[in-house]
């Protein structure tokens, strides 16, 4: 956290992420540093209200801080001068620092960093610019909804968004999944659901030395169909490109193949699932572990719930593509900051609650609410970082909740389809 604070106030980050050499060369009421701190403070209300609260919070809690009031119009102009990737860079720095010389704190599955790839959609403000870039879905209404495709590479055990992509709806999830591979490394195991499988995805994983687990339908290929009909629990088979797949832009021919392991998994409802994996060692990875392993992917589903319902990412603070990307990367960064703090607290709660009827964990919903404004202290004040984090930890622990194992809830597959859509028309943001 201290490293990130130093980066926020460094001149290097200004030079790297200002849009033009002429930007931020004169002393103004609002600086590069105060602008990016303001943007990570959950801007879900009217900008005028957020600015007033931001200035008031700093003046009250940091009497020595140099901060001047600024208008909504001034903020809009300042944010245009900052590249959206500044928040991605800060997030990358946080993640890199966490995974460096920190083995005792990193949660792994049998030595693997356990990652999952999943996609979703974000509802965007209804503007001509965003519709032309990202696309529009038609529904029962005549107007439709402007949406973008989102994809993340997510560490399900440590709860970090390693990489996030916002793309047009026309971009397929499998294409985005291949882009995520640039952020994977040896001793990573990536889990995919049944929207992703292809020979190309399997080939790319072997080529990069990254292990995988992919859920597929029984009729995914002749090989999986034969395996399903065989009744076998597990088998090593050869996978090849499909007959009608274009190969002119691929580094392999139609005769190429990769050996993979197929595992049969029986679900509680009687449904049979087939998993494709690169984990060949049946002694180290017996068939019995794959069902539980696959369902660890659920962590990325929880991440999307937090992104949309706790951080409220779809309540964007602007209407241009520039603003949308800033808010998107800022939301991922805030999520990772929360995971860093909460992860350490949950480890402490686990140790402290040994011998109790239930283990305890931080209430994630409340934790995001507590971070509002306090995240300003983390990155804008010169107060000792240990003291700030300690105060946050005390607050989070006070509102911890018990973990009740084996609780099951009926999954509502239409949850997001039925929810009220955030219609972000101008001058219609919340004021309280």
Image: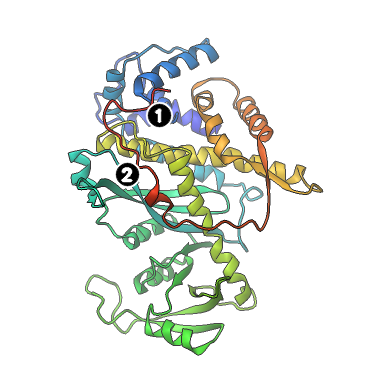
Seen from the viewer's position, the closer of residues 81 and 245 is: 245
Based on the displayed image, in which of its 4 quarters is residue 353 positioned? Answer: top right
- Displayed quadrant of residue 431: top left
Q: In terms of image quadrants, where is residue 218?
A: bottom left
Report which residue position mark 1 lands on. Answer: 43
Residue at (40% x, 59% y) in the render: 181
Few, some or many residues within 10 Å of mark 2 (<14, 14–19, 20+): many
Residue 339 location (% of width, % of height): 55, 42
Give the quarter of the figure containing the C terminus: top left
Q: Earlier in the sequence, mark 2 or mark 1?
A: 1
Q: Quadrant of the N terminus?
A: top right
Residue marked by disc 2: 123
The image shows residue 297, relative to residue 49, as above or below, that is below
Q: For the residue labelled by badge 1, is the local secondary structure a helix, a strand or a loop?
A: loop
Find the residue positioned furthest to the right: 355
Q: Which mark is residue 391?
A: none
């Amino acid at each position: 956290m201290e490293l990130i604070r130093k980066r926020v106030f460094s001149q290097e980050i200004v030079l790297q992420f200002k849009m033009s050499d002429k930007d931020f060369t004169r002393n103004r009421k609002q600086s590069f540093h105060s602008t990016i701190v303001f943007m990570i403070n959950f801007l879900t209300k009217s900008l005028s209200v957020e600015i007033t609260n931001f200035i008031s919070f700093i003046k009250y809690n940091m009497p020595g801080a140099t901060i001047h009031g600024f208008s909504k119009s001034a903020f809009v102009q300042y944010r245009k001068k900052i590249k959206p990737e500044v928040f991605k860079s800060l997030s990358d720095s946080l993640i890199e620092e966490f995974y460096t010389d920190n083995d005792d704190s990193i949660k792994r599955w049998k030595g693997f960093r356990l990652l999952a790839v999943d996609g979703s959609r974000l509802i965007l403000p209804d503007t001509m610019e965003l519709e032309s870039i990202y696309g529009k879905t038609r529904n029962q209404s005549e107007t439709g909804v402007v949406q973008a495709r989102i994809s993340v590479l997510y560490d399900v055990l440590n709860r970090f968004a390693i990489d996030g992509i916002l793309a047009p709806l026309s971009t397929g999830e499998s294409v985005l999944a291949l882009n995520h591979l640039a952020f994977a490394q040896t001793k990573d195991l990536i889990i995919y659901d049944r929207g992703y499988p292809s020979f190309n995805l399997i080939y790319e994983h072997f080529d990069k030395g990254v292990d995988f687990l992919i859920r597929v339908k029984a009729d995914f290929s002749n090989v999986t169909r034969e395996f399903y009909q065989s009744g076998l629990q597990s088998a090593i088979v050869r996978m090849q490109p499909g007959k009608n797949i274009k190969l002119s832009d691929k580094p392999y021919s139609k005769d190429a193949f990769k050996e993979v392991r197929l595992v049969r998994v029986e679900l509680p409802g009687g449904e049979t699932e087939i998993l494709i994996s690169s984990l060949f060692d049946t002694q180290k990875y017996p068939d019995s572990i794959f069902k539980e392993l696959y369902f660890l992917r659920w962590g990325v589903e929880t991440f999307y719930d937090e992104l949309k319902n706790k951080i409220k990412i779809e309540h964007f603070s602007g209407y241009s593509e520039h603003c949308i990307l800033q808010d998107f990367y800022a939301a991922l960064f805030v999520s990772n900051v929360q995971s860093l703090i909460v992860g350490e607290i949950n480890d402490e709660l686990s140790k402290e609650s040994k011998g109790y009827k239930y283990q305890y964990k931080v209430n994630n919903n409340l934790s995001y609410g507590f971070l509002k404004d306090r995240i300003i202290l983390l990155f804008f004040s010169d107060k000792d970082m240990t003291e700030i984090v300690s105060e946050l930890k005390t607050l989070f622990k006070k509102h911890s909740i018990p973990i009740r194992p084996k609780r099951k809830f009926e999954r509502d597959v239409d949850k997001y389809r039925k929810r009220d859509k955030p219609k972000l028309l101008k001058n219609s943001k919340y004021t309280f």
